Amino acid sequence: MGAASTLRGELRRDEPMARHVSWRAGGPVARAYFPADLADLSAFLRGLRHDEPLLFVGLGSNLLVRDGGFDGTVVFTHGALKTLRLEPPSGLIYAEAGVASPKLARFAANHDLGGAEFLAGVPGTVGGALAMNAGCYGGETWQFVERVLMMDRRGELITRPAADFAVGYRHVGLLEACDEWFAAAWLRFPAGDGRISRTRIRDLLARRVASQPLALPNAGSVFRNPPEDHAARLIEATGLKGLTLGGAQVSEMHSNFIVNPDGEATAAEIEMLIGQVQARVGEKFGVELQREVRIVGVSA
């Protein structure tokens, strides 16, 4: 890698990804880069081989790396791409990809902007929320996106309007395929009442605590909700709540969550349990559950 001496971030080799994903399971990544900021990340990417497998990770709340690891480079955005500001006179919020979604929700509320409360229930970063149109409790990220800042593998920054993207349920893609990652976004939230928004955030978080197994390692909802139905309902109706495979378990609290209660599950066990749930729901209801979580790497 050229010009490594000018980089200000930290490069690690054979970094265990179980430390960095919320499932607390999985194999190592060949190279892990923790950039200092957006400019440093740009410099790092300029030094990479053009064919280097590249993965951007925020809080790792929607990711599983197989036990054999990922033979490429992972860039960690959380704690690095962290700029969050209100831009007068436009009223837009500028948020970099590494900003935690709940932090954005609180920031909007504290500036008397409404509509962002649902982001308090998204357990990842702005980058992840943009990549999958994250949503819950009636809100979705791309309802509020005006434009985004993308970074390509040459480290170049490109500003794109929302119209450049095909946005769907838990899926976002550029209309023209190319290697680009979300670096930041400008979001427009309507005027609101900060006091009301903060109350909604507290209520939403209380609902999460009461209904989701947040005390155990998990990756949030494993499956997308099928049209006009809920994945959790189908899984529970199939009798799979509490099903275990090795150290992995279908949560007894919320059946669309797979948990790693003792921290001993392998990535293979989690992935096999996902497959079992898909197969048995398919047999009983004829519904093919689509994964919401991302799985990368090779088996051990």
Image: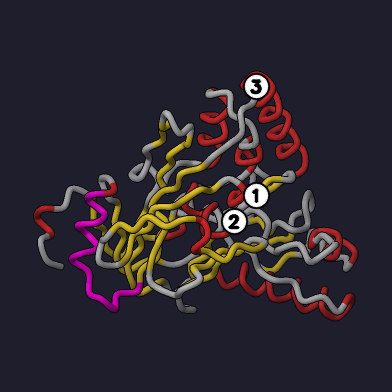
Mark 1 lies on a secondary structure that is strand
* Residue 255, picture quadrant: bottom right
Near mark 1 (Cα within 10 A), the count class, few <14, some 14-19 or many ≥20, is many
- Earlier in the chain: of badge 2 and badge 3, it is 2
Q: Which circle marks residue 300 in the picture?
A: none
Give the residue at x 70% y 61%.
249
Observer-side mark, 2 or 3, equals 3
Residue 186 in the image: above or below residue 228: above
- Counting labels gives 3
Farthest residue to the front: give it.
89
**Tag 3 residue:** 193
- Tell me the quarter of the image containing the N terminus: bottom left
- For the residue pair 129 and 222, the one nearer the viewer reads as 129
Near mark 3 (Cα within 10 A), the count class, few <14, some 14-19 or many ≥20, is some
- Left or right: 30 in relation to 132: left
**Tag 2 residue:** 133
- Left or right: 170 in relation to 206: left
Q: Which circle marks residue 140 in the picture?
A: 1
Residue 121 in the image: above or below residue 51: above
- For the residue pair 10 and 41, the one nearer the viewer reads as 41
In the image, which residues are magenta?
A: 39-53
Work out whether residue 293 can be spotted. Answer: no
Amino acid type assigned to the residue bearing label 3 in the image: Asp
- Earlier in the chain: of badge 2 and badge 1, it is 2
Determine the CA span between mark 2 and mark 3.
25 Å
Mark 3 lies on a secondary structure that is loop
Residue 222 part of the magenta-drawn span: no
Amino acid type assigned to the residue bearing label 2 in the image: Asn
Determine the CA span between mark 1 and mark 3.
20 Å
CB under 8 Å between callouts 2 and 3? no
Residue 51 part of the magenta-drawn span: yes
The image shows residue 90 at horizontal and vertical percentages of 45, 34
